[in-house]
Image (tube, helix red, strand yellow):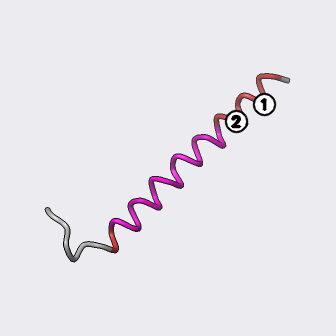
Amino acid sequence: GDLGRGAAQSVLLFLAVIGVTLWQFRTSGERVSYGGS
């Protein structure tokens, strides 16, 4: 029902956020040549 669909959407949103975070971490990790810290 609605509960299952809401849970599925929450999981998809959670995975999307993690995917973007990992992608940004990977791309930022490749440009350490002109970064600070």
Seen at 65% across and 40% down, the residue is 11
Q: Quadrant of the C terminus?
A: bottom left
Q: Where are the magenta residues, as a range?
A: 11-28
Residue tagged 1: 5
User: Magenta: predominant secondary structure element?
Assistant: helix
Label 1–label 2 contact, CB within 8 A: yes
Q: Is residue 9 left or right of residue 35?
A: right
Residue tagged 2: 9
Q: Is residue 19 left or right of residue 31?
A: right
Residue 8 location, x and y as percent?
A: 73, 36
Residue type of the residue flagged with mark 1: Arg
Residue type of the residue flagged with mark 2: Gln
Q: Residues within 10 Å of mark 2 (few under 14, many from 20)?
A: few
Q: Secondary structure at mark 2?
A: helix
Question: Vertically, is 24 above or below 7?
Answer: below
Question: Vertically, is 11 above or below 37?
Answer: above
Residue 15 location, x and y as percent?
A: 59, 48
The residue most toward the front is 34
The residue most toward the top is 2
Residue 24 location, x and y as percent?
A: 41, 59
The residue most toward the left is 37
Residue 2 location, x and y as percent?
A: 80, 22
